[in-house]
Amino acid sequence: MNNKWVVLISLLPIVATAQEGQETMDHSQHMMMDHSQHMMGAVETAGDTEQATEMDHSQHMMGAVGETGEAEQPAQMDHSQHMMDHSQHSMDHSQHDTGAAVHLHHGHGAGSVMLEYRFMRMTMSGLLDGSDEVSSSEVTDMAGYHYMMAPTEMVMDMHMVMGMYGINDKFGLMFMLNYLQNSMDMVDADNEVSSMSSSGLGDIDLGVMYSLPAGFMLNVNLGVPTGSISEEGEMMGEQVRLPYPMQLGSGTYDLKPSMTYNHSFGAMVAGGQATYIYRMGENEAGYALGDRLEMSGWLRYSMKSGVTLSGRLAYAEWGNIEGQDDEIAQTMPMPGMPNMKSSPTANPEAQGGARADLFLGASYMSGGGHMFGLEYGLPLLQKLNGPQMKTASVLSLAYQYSF
């Protein structure tokens, strides 16, 4: 994206303002550590700033995970909603993101540990070109888009394991690894359906978090290219390299800065986050996924029963693939048609777009640092460089343990 440096630079005034605020903090404020949330993939956190002698650990929500009321469990780390959103792996294929490169970040006290397992499923069905519906027959029509195959459905499952460690009351470290399972159905001009699948380890995220005054949290992650970009399968009866959405990683080191803000008022918490994913160069196959901008805002309500309800609006936009993998065939020879286009999923210029989603979630915090949560999201609008498969739904289930 052309605006990547603008986004990165725009974070600096926020940091500077927060640092000025820190210099004017009085003694009572220094007794409170306001630790912001941590979101993995796009959700909320906040801390209770009213308990001046108690370290406030922002609730960490698992797939819209919430927390119990702070007054009821003063000895427990209070975690707010944390959505790993799929970012694109956070499912980090920019063209099919769960919102997982969007992470919500929060601080932990010195020596504290948080471990999380999350399952996320993203389903896609149907095609868009811009915001217009496109049928599979139009995609394969000789007088239409003129492709041999059209994608009809795709399911992306991701199993994520994440951990965070508090070095002190300001700094923390995190890691996230994931295992992906992808499946896709395609149809040709004769309505013959074929399927393909891929699975394996995805990219790994390593990151640092820094708590700022006034409810801000700065986080910088580095995506490490451990996911395969050379997955193969059968297409039209031949063994070929699978198209871009079926690959397991980006193949590049990805810089992922983000800024999170939270404000609590009574049992309610409101917050927001902005994240940018910057691809640092091309991968060994000769391409780079599009840069990605993610923004999210949320409201969370905590009940005395330990149940938290949440709502979240998320927006993401991402660019087309730059370059191309010559092993992913954009054309396939046919009798009389030597340059017949294979599928939109193999076209680097049909991978970008923008999407706005609405998520609703609930979580339950039990004793001993255990938390269970879920979140379900539906798209409000999508505008895709197509023809491209549109998102149908995103489901997230999570378990978290803190000590």
Image (tube, helix red, strand yellow):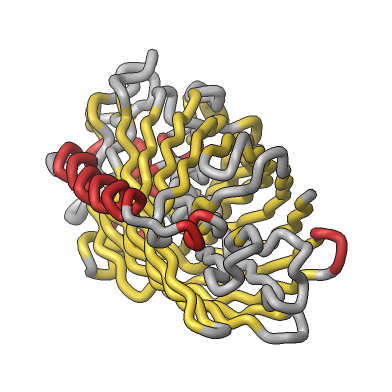
Looking at the image, which residue is at 34% across and 68% down?
A: 356
Looking at the image, which residue is at 69% across and 42% down?
A: 161
**Residue 368 shown left or right of residue 53 in the figure:** right
Q: Return the residue nearer the eye: 245 or 76.
A: 76
Q: Quadrant of the N terminus?
A: top left
Residue 285, by quadrant, is top left
Residue 388, by quadrant, is bottom left
Looking at the image, which residue is at 68% across and 54% down?
A: 119
Relative vertical location of residue 88 with respect to residue 279 in this rendering, above or below = below
Looking at the image, which residue is at 48% across and 81% down?
A: 265
Q: Residue furthest top?
A: 284
Relative vertical location of residue 215 with respect to residue 93 in this rendering, above or below = below
Q: Return the residue nearer the eye: 388 or 72.
A: 72
Relative vertical location of residue 339 with respect to residue 45 in this rendering, above or below = above
Residue 159 seen in this snapshot: yes
**Residue 374 shown left or right of residue 340 in the figure:** right
Q: Residue furthest right?
A: 368
Q: How many marks?
A: 0
Place of residue 100 in the rendered image (x, y in percent of width and height, measured from the top left): 49, 50
Place of residue 192 in the rendered image (x, y in percent of width and height, measured from the top left): 50, 52
Residue 360, by quadrant, is bottom right
Relative vertical location of residue 364 with respect to residue 384 in this rendering, above or below = below
Place of residue 228 in the rendered image (x, y in percent of width and height, measured from the top left): 54, 24
Residue 63 seen in this snapshot: no
Place of residue 30 in the rendered image (x, y in percent of width and height, measured from the top left): 50, 54
